Amino acid sequence: MSSPALDIESLEAAYEPGLPIVRGANLRVHPGEIVAILGPNGAGKSTLVKAVAGLVPISAGRVLLHGADITCVPAHRLVFEGLAFVPQTENVFANLTIAENLELAAAILKADKRERLDPVYAMFSDLQRQRALLAGRLSGGQRQMLAVARALIARPRVLMLDEPSAGLSPKLVGQVLDQLKRVRDTGVTVVLVEQNVKAALAVADRAAVLVEGREHLVGTAAELRADARIAELYLGRHVQAQAVA
Ligand SMILES: Nc1ncnc2c1ncn2[C@@H]1O[C@H](COP(=O)(O)OP(=O)(O)OP(=O)(O)O)[C@@H](O)[C@H]1O
Ligand SMILES: [Mg+2]
Protein backbone atom coordinates (compact mmCIF):
# COMPACT_ATOMS: atom_id res chain seq x y z
CA MET A 1 0.00 0.00 0.00
CA SER A 2 1.27 3.50 -0.76
CA SER A 3 2.26 5.68 2.19
CA PRO A 4 -0.16 8.31 3.43
CA ALA A 5 0.16 11.71 1.78
CA LEU A 6 0.41 13.29 5.21
CA ASP A 7 0.81 11.54 8.51
CA ILE A 8 0.67 13.54 11.71
CA GLU A 9 1.72 11.41 14.64
CA SER A 10 1.30 12.36 18.32
CA LEU A 11 2.15 15.94 17.47
CA GLU A 12 2.79 18.53 20.13
CA ALA A 13 3.40 22.16 19.25
CA ALA A 14 3.90 25.15 21.51
CA TYR A 15 4.46 28.87 21.11
CA GLU A 16 6.08 28.89 24.51
CA PRO A 17 8.11 25.97 25.89
CA GLY A 18 6.07 23.83 28.26
CA LEU A 19 2.72 25.24 27.13
CA PRO A 20 1.61 22.97 24.29
CA ILE A 21 -1.38 24.10 22.24
CA VAL A 22 -1.37 21.03 20.01
CA ARG A 23 -1.36 18.17 22.46
CA GLY A 24 -0.77 14.80 20.86
CA ALA A 25 -2.71 15.24 17.61
CA ASN A 26 -2.94 12.41 15.08
CA LEU A 27 -4.19 12.65 11.53
CA ARG A 28 -3.57 10.44 8.52
CA VAL A 29 -4.45 11.81 5.10
CA HIS A 30 -4.45 9.52 2.07
CA PRO A 31 -3.33 10.58 -1.41
CA GLY A 32 -6.10 12.33 -3.32
CA GLU A 33 -8.28 12.96 -0.29
CA ILE A 34 -9.81 16.21 0.86
CA VAL A 35 -9.65 16.23 4.65
CA ALA A 36 -11.21 18.99 6.75
CA ILE A 37 -9.98 19.94 10.20
CA LEU A 38 -12.92 21.24 12.22
CA GLY A 39 -13.28 22.29 15.82
CA PRO A 40 -14.35 25.10 18.11
CA ASN A 41 -12.53 28.44 18.33
CA GLY A 42 -9.23 28.12 20.11
CA ALA A 43 -9.05 24.35 19.63
CA GLY A 44 -5.60 24.68 18.06
CA LYS A 45 -6.55 24.12 14.40
CA SER A 46 -4.40 26.96 13.07
CA THR A 47 -1.58 26.02 15.39
CA LEU A 48 -1.70 22.44 14.09
CA VAL A 49 -1.46 23.39 10.42
CA LYS A 50 1.14 26.06 11.15
CA ALA A 51 3.22 23.49 13.04
CA VAL A 52 3.00 21.09 10.08
CA ALA A 53 4.01 24.01 7.83
CA GLY A 54 7.08 24.67 9.99
CA LEU A 55 5.77 27.93 11.44
CA VAL A 56 5.22 26.89 15.06
CA PRO A 57 7.85 24.87 16.97
CA ILE A 58 7.10 21.16 17.31
CA SER A 59 7.97 19.81 20.76
CA ALA A 60 7.05 16.13 20.23
CA GLY A 61 5.75 13.73 17.62
CA ARG A 62 6.42 13.78 13.91
CA VAL A 63 5.05 14.65 10.50
CA LEU A 64 5.57 12.47 7.44
CA LEU A 65 4.92 13.64 3.89
CA HIS A 66 4.55 10.70 1.51
CA GLY A 67 6.68 8.72 3.95
CA ALA A 68 9.46 11.31 4.33
CA ASP A 69 9.99 12.82 7.77
CA ILE A 70 9.47 16.57 7.45
CA THR A 71 9.19 17.34 11.17
CA CYS A 72 12.34 19.45 11.24
CA VAL A 73 12.19 20.87 7.72
CA PRO A 74 12.02 24.69 7.90
CA ALA A 75 8.97 26.41 6.43
CA HIS A 76 10.72 27.83 3.35
CA ARG A 77 12.04 24.38 2.36
CA LEU A 78 8.73 22.54 2.64
CA VAL A 79 7.53 23.76 -0.71
CA PHE A 80 10.41 21.85 -2.31
CA GLU A 81 9.35 18.73 -0.40
CA GLY A 82 5.85 18.95 -1.89
CA LEU A 83 3.87 20.73 0.82
CA ALA A 84 2.27 24.12 0.19
CA PHE A 85 0.52 26.11 2.91
CA VAL A 86 -2.00 28.91 2.42
CA PRO A 87 -2.31 30.90 5.66
CA GLN A 88 -5.60 32.48 6.64
CA THR A 89 -4.48 36.07 6.08
CA GLU A 90 -1.75 37.91 4.22
CA ASN A 91 -1.59 35.13 1.66
CA VAL A 92 -1.19 37.43 -1.39
CA PHE A 93 0.74 40.64 -2.06
CA ALA A 94 -1.99 43.28 -2.24
CA ASN A 95 0.22 45.85 -3.99
CA LEU A 96 1.22 43.47 -6.79
CA THR A 97 -0.93 42.40 -9.72
CA ILE A 98 -2.31 38.89 -10.06
CA ALA A 99 0.35 38.14 -12.67
CA GLU A 100 3.13 39.54 -10.46
CA ASN A 101 1.93 37.49 -7.50
CA LEU A 102 2.12 34.32 -9.58
CA GLU A 103 5.41 35.26 -11.26
CA LEU A 104 6.97 35.97 -7.89
CA ALA A 105 5.93 32.52 -6.67
CA ALA A 106 7.64 30.99 -9.73
CA ALA A 107 10.74 33.19 -9.27
CA ILE A 108 11.15 32.11 -5.65
CA LEU A 109 11.17 28.51 -6.87
CA LYS A 110 13.62 29.42 -9.65
CA ALA A 111 11.10 27.81 -11.99
CA ASP A 112 10.18 28.68 -15.55
CA LYS A 113 7.44 31.32 -15.41
CA ARG A 114 5.42 30.27 -18.44
CA GLU A 115 5.61 26.59 -17.64
CA ARG A 116 4.30 27.20 -14.12
CA LEU A 117 1.76 29.94 -14.82
CA ASP A 118 0.01 28.46 -17.86
CA PRO A 119 -1.57 25.45 -16.12
CA VAL A 120 -2.63 27.63 -13.20
CA TYR A 121 -4.26 30.18 -15.52
CA ALA A 122 -5.95 27.31 -17.35
CA MET A 123 -7.51 26.29 -14.07
CA PHE A 124 -8.43 29.78 -12.87
CA SER A 125 -9.70 31.59 -15.96
CA ASP A 126 -10.94 34.54 -13.86
CA LEU A 127 -7.39 35.16 -12.70
CA GLN A 128 -6.06 35.02 -16.23
CA ARG A 129 -8.66 37.51 -17.41
CA GLN A 130 -7.85 39.90 -14.58
CA ARG A 131 -4.12 39.26 -14.46
CA ALA A 132 -3.18 42.95 -14.67
CA LEU A 133 -5.36 43.82 -11.67
CA LEU A 134 -3.82 44.57 -8.29
CA ALA A 135 -4.49 41.76 -5.84
CA GLY A 136 -5.65 44.37 -3.33
CA ARG A 137 -8.55 45.22 -5.64
CA LEU A 138 -9.91 41.68 -5.73
CA SER A 139 -13.01 40.52 -3.91
CA GLY A 140 -12.51 38.22 -0.93
CA GLY A 141 -13.34 35.12 -2.96
CA GLN A 142 -11.05 36.06 -5.85
CA ARG A 143 -8.27 36.84 -3.45
CA GLN A 144 -8.57 33.36 -1.94
CA MET A 145 -8.45 31.87 -5.46
CA LEU A 146 -5.25 33.82 -6.07
CA ALA A 147 -3.79 32.53 -2.80
CA VAL A 148 -4.60 28.97 -3.90
CA ALA A 149 -3.19 29.63 -7.38
CA ARG A 150 0.04 31.00 -5.88
CA ALA A 151 0.41 27.85 -3.80
CA LEU A 152 -0.19 25.67 -6.88
CA ILE A 153 2.70 27.31 -8.74
CA ALA A 154 4.92 25.11 -6.57
CA ARG A 155 3.12 21.98 -7.85
CA PRO A 156 2.61 20.63 -4.34
CA ARG A 157 1.56 17.08 -3.63
CA VAL A 158 -0.27 18.29 -0.53
CA LEU A 159 -2.02 21.65 -0.29
CA MET A 160 -2.88 22.78 3.23
CA LEU A 161 -5.11 25.79 3.86
CA ASP A 162 -6.21 27.63 6.98
CA GLU A 163 -9.82 28.77 6.64
CA PRO A 164 -9.89 29.59 2.92
CA SER A 165 -13.53 30.64 3.22
CA ALA A 166 -13.16 32.98 6.21
CA GLY A 167 -15.20 36.15 5.81
CA LEU A 168 -16.87 35.07 2.57
CA SER A 169 -20.60 35.06 1.81
CA PRO A 170 -22.23 31.61 1.83
CA LYS A 171 -22.29 31.53 -1.97
CA LEU A 172 -18.58 32.32 -2.21
CA VAL A 173 -17.77 29.77 0.49
CA GLY A 174 -19.27 27.13 -1.81
CA GLN A 175 -17.34 28.44 -4.82
CA VAL A 176 -13.98 28.46 -3.05
CA LEU A 177 -14.53 24.98 -1.67
CA ASP A 178 -15.66 23.72 -5.10
CA GLN A 179 -12.40 25.04 -6.54
CA LEU A 180 -10.54 22.95 -3.99
CA LYS A 181 -12.36 19.92 -5.35
CA ARG A 182 -11.07 20.79 -8.81
CA VAL A 183 -7.58 21.12 -7.36
CA ARG A 184 -7.93 17.69 -5.80
CA ASP A 185 -9.12 16.31 -9.14
CA THR A 186 -5.72 17.25 -10.58
CA GLY A 187 -4.11 14.86 -8.09
CA VAL A 188 -3.32 17.22 -5.22
CA THR A 189 -4.20 16.09 -1.69
CA VAL A 190 -6.05 18.84 0.18
CA VAL A 191 -6.11 19.49 3.92
CA LEU A 192 -8.14 22.44 5.09
CA VAL A 193 -9.13 24.03 8.36
CA GLU A 194 -12.75 25.17 8.17
CA GLN A 195 -15.26 26.99 10.36
CA ASN A 196 -18.05 26.41 7.87
CA VAL A 197 -18.77 22.89 9.02
CA LYS A 198 -21.65 22.19 6.69
CA ALA A 199 -19.85 23.45 3.60
CA ALA A 200 -16.65 21.66 4.60
CA LEU A 201 -18.45 18.35 5.07
CA ALA A 202 -20.05 18.81 1.65
CA VAL A 203 -16.66 18.79 -0.12
CA ALA A 204 -14.42 16.78 2.21
CA ASP A 205 -13.99 13.03 2.00
CA ARG A 206 -13.12 12.85 5.68
CA ALA A 207 -12.84 15.23 8.58
CA ALA A 208 -11.29 15.46 12.01
CA VAL A 209 -12.72 17.50 14.85
CA LEU A 210 -9.97 18.98 16.97
CA VAL A 211 -10.74 19.80 20.60
CA GLU A 212 -8.12 21.09 23.03
CA GLY A 213 -5.26 20.28 20.73
CA ARG A 214 -6.08 16.72 19.77
CA GLU A 215 -8.48 14.91 17.51
CA HIS A 216 -11.76 14.23 19.18
CA LEU A 217 -13.66 12.67 16.29
CA VAL A 218 -12.40 11.43 12.94
CA GLY A 219 -14.58 9.97 10.24
CA THR A 220 -15.88 10.17 6.74
CA ALA A 221 -17.83 13.31 5.92
CA ALA A 222 -21.01 11.23 5.82
CA GLU A 223 -20.31 9.79 9.26
CA LEU A 224 -19.67 13.20 10.74
CA ARG A 225 -22.73 14.75 9.10
CA ALA A 226 -24.77 12.09 10.86
CA ASP A 227 -22.93 12.37 14.17
CA ALA A 228 -24.93 14.14 16.81
CA ARG A 229 -21.75 15.07 18.65
CA ILE A 230 -21.00 17.58 15.89
CA ALA A 231 -24.21 19.42 16.69
CA GLU A 232 -23.37 19.27 20.36
CA LEU A 233 -19.87 20.66 19.87
CA TYR A 234 -20.88 23.50 17.63
CA LEU A 235 -24.34 24.36 18.74
CA GLY A 236 -24.22 23.34 22.39
CA ARG A 237 -27.14 21.01 21.81
CA HIS A 238 -27.54 18.22 24.28
CA VAL A 239 -28.22 15.07 22.42
CA GLN A 240 -29.60 11.80 23.53
CA ALA A 241 -27.12 9.05 24.23
CA GLN A 242 -28.60 6.65 21.69
CA ALA A 243 -28.19 9.24 18.92
CA VAL A 244 -24.45 9.34 19.60
CA ALA A 245 -23.96 5.57 19.13
N1 LIG B 1 1.15 33.43 18.39
C1 LIG B 1 0.64 32.88 19.49
N2 LIG B 1 1.29 32.94 20.67
C2 LIG B 1 0.78 32.38 21.78
N3 LIG B 1 -0.41 31.72 21.83
C3 LIG B 1 -1.10 31.63 20.69
C4 LIG B 1 -0.62 32.21 19.46
N4 LIG B 1 -1.54 31.94 18.49
C5 LIG B 1 -2.52 31.24 19.09
N5 LIG B 1 -2.27 31.05 20.41
C6 LIG B 1 -3.13 30.33 21.35
O1 LIG B 1 -3.29 29.01 20.91
C7 LIG B 1 -4.62 28.55 21.17
C8 LIG B 1 -5.18 27.95 19.91
O2 LIG B 1 -5.23 28.95 18.90
P1 LIG B 1 -5.47 28.60 17.38
O3 LIG B 1 -5.38 29.88 16.65
O4 LIG B 1 -4.57 27.49 16.96
O5 LIG B 1 -6.96 28.05 17.43
P2 LIG B 1 -7.99 27.80 16.25
O6 LIG B 1 -8.58 26.45 16.50
O7 LIG B 1 -7.34 28.02 14.94
O8 LIG B 1 -9.10 28.89 16.55
P3 LIG B 1 -10.04 29.75 15.54
O9 LIG B 1 -11.18 28.83 15.20
O10 LIG B 1 -10.45 30.89 16.36
O11 LIG B 1 -9.21 30.13 14.35
C9 LIG B 1 -5.40 29.77 21.67
O12 LIG B 1 -5.56 29.63 23.06
C10 LIG B 1 -4.53 30.95 21.35
O13 LIG B 1 -4.63 31.93 22.33
MG1 LIG C 1 -7.63 29.37 13.42
Image (cartoon, rainbow, N blue to C red):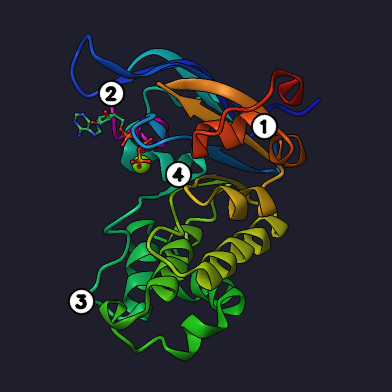
Q: Position of residue 33 (x, y in %)?
A: 69, 43
In three-dimensional space, the C-alpha distance between marks 4 and 1, rounded to whole angstroms, equals 41 Å
In three-dimensional space, the C-alpha distance between marks 4 and 3, rounded to whole angstroms, equals 26 Å
* Image quadrant assignment for residue 231: top right
* Residue bearing the label numbered 1: 228
In three-dimensional space, the C-alpha distance between marks 2 and 3, rounded to whole angstroms, equals 31 Å
Which residue is farthest right?
1
Q: Which mark is residue 95?
A: 3
Q: What's under tag 3, amino acid-wise?
A: Asn
Q: What's under tag 1, amino acid-wise?
A: Ala
In three-dimensional space, the C-alpha distance between marks 2 and 1, rounded to whole angstroms, equals 34 Å
Considering the numbered disc 2 on the image, is that residue within a helix, a strand or a loop? loop
Span shown in magenta? 47-56
Return the disc, 1 or 3, that comes first in the chain's sequence.
3
Question: Is 36 placed left or right of 236 in the picture?
Answer: right
* Residue bearing the label numbered 4: 80
